[in-house]
Image: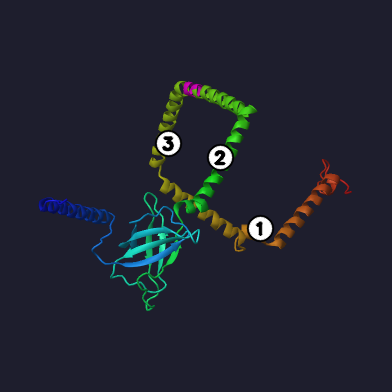
Amino acid sequence: MSFPLKNIKSEIKIGFIVVVSMGLFFWGLNFLKGVNLLKPSNYYVVTYTRVDGLVKSSPVTLDGFQVGLVRDIEYLYENPGHIMVTLDLNPKLRLPAGSSAALVGSLLGNPSIELTLGQAGSPILSHGDSLLAVIEPGLMDQLKGGLLTSMERMVNHTDSLVTGVETLLNNGSLANSLSSIEQSTNELKKLTVNLNKTLNNDLPGILQHVDQLTQEYSGFGKHLNQLDLEGTLSKADKAIENLSNLSTRLNSSDNSMGLLLNDKSLYLNLSSTASSANELLFDLKEHPKRYVHFSLFGNSNKQ
């Protein structure tokens, strides 16, 4: 049985179109994933103990700039607990020995790989070499270590506070306190009403008296302004000066009053004279005939 040549050519064309279409589909799918099959790359492997949702085509960055993609993720069944990740990096990138690949979690999206270069001057790693695996603490890890602990303490404190409030409500203390506050508010309201009445009734009269008193003080101030205070003070200064001169003269011994006040001998003489005069008057009273004698007949005897 033979087939026409025309039918064979048609089948070849259809097969060729199918192969080309599948190739374009495969290339386009990888291109959408960020894998350029036409561009050569360097491949490195990293072994993690967990990947936290890392997927193929996740970005690989260096200093925040994307330098490659995650090409493959394979679980090592012969070594349970380990996952090998293949990185497809730009061929221009040269990684020195000691370079690490950190698995960095994301709050909204999938994790990514962040490269850290080894020490400058170290030997350059070859295609297919392994990088050091580093797993950065994720958001949940950070929350467990800090925020969640603080929130747990806050919840415990809140629970204690709620328990205290419930106890206060149950034993009636809060109701009594609210009743006392309400009573105090009523008393304050009454006091405010009385104060308003007092202000409305008495305050105008008080203000009127204050106004009169202010006017009187104003008149007194005007009267004081009209007084010759300077002349009065001058006279007072002169009087004080005269008193000072008088005091000085009394303390001096060059005048009669000064001698009388300051000379002790004069005081003693005056005291002695007064004493003698007192004795004389006493003797005169007891024996008047010694000092006064007269007779109607011109003759009398002396005692």
Mark 1 vs 2, N-terminal side? 2
Please name the residue that numbered disc 1 is placed on.
Answer: 261
Q: Is residue 101 visible?
A: yes
Disc 3 marks a residue whose amino acid type is Phe
Disc 1 marks a residue whose amino acid type is Leu
Residue 107 in the image: x percent, y percent? 39, 50
Residue at the location (74% across, 59% down)? 268
Front residue of 250 and 244? 244
Circles 3 and 2, Cβ within 8 Å, touching? The answer is no
Q: Residue 88 has which mark?
A: none
Mark 3 vs 2, N-terminal side? 2
Helix, strand or loop status at disc 3:
helix
Disc 2 marks a residue whose amino acid type is Thr
**Magenta stretch, main secondary structure class:** helix
Mark 3–mark 1 Cα distance, whole angstroms, equals 47 Å
Q: Is residue 63 visible?
A: no
Please name the residue that numbered disc 2 is placed on.
Answer: 158
Residue at the location (51% across, 48% down)? 148
Give the mark toward the camera: 3 or 2.
Answer: 2
Please name the residue that numbered disc 3 is placed on.
Answer: 220
Residue 243 in the image: x percent, y percent? 54, 54
Residue 112 in the image: x percent, y percent? 37, 57
Q: Which residues are magenta?
A: 193-198
Q: Looking at this rendering, what residue extends furthest in the front direction?
A: 1
Classify mark 1: residues with Cα within 10 Å, few (<14), some (14-19) or many (20+). some
Front residue of 161 and 147? 147
